[in-house]
Amino acid sequence: MVHVRSEKWNAAKKMPPLRHSVPGQKFDILKSEAAQWLTRQPDIMQIVFESVKNREITYDPEMGTWQGVDYDD
């Protein structure tokens, strides 16, 4: 079976030059300019959500909320 890649990934093709790590510092994904830019793109945000919905997160129609399948109150 051939996996068709979503056109939404094309948003990443517009990323400007950004650092993924800070020179001289231990790598920290939270400091990655590239990762931050990518996660602010609506198309990429939608892909991430779609990839986990109904597997790792589920919807509660009564509450109108989503939560992780392993979430403990």
Image (cartoon, helix red, strand yellow):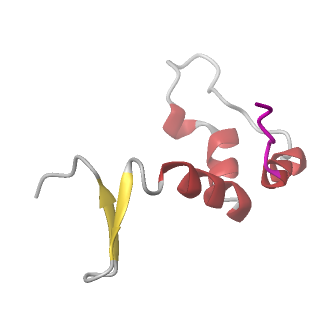
User: In the picture, residue 43 is in which quadrant?
Assistant: bottom right
38 shown above or below 46: above
3 shown above or below 70: above
Q: Nearer the viewer, residue 49 or 39?
A: 49
Residue 3 is inside the magenta segment = yes
User: In the picture, residue 32 is in which quadrant?
Assistant: top right
If the image is split into quadrants, where does the C terminus sit? bottom left
Q: Nearer the viewer, residue 31 or 53?
A: 53
5 shown above or below 67: above
Residue 28, given in percent of the width and then of the height, sits at 49, 28
Determine whether, in the image, residue 41 is placed left or right of residue 63: right
If the image is split into quadrants, where does the N terminus sit? top right
Determine whether, in the image, residue 34 is placed left or right of residue 8: left
Q: Range of the magenta residues?
A: 1-6
Q: Nearer the viewer, residue 49 or 37?
A: 49
Residue 26 is inside the magenta segment = no
Residue shown at 37% from the left, 55% from the top = 57
Residue shown at 69% from the left, 54% from the top = 44
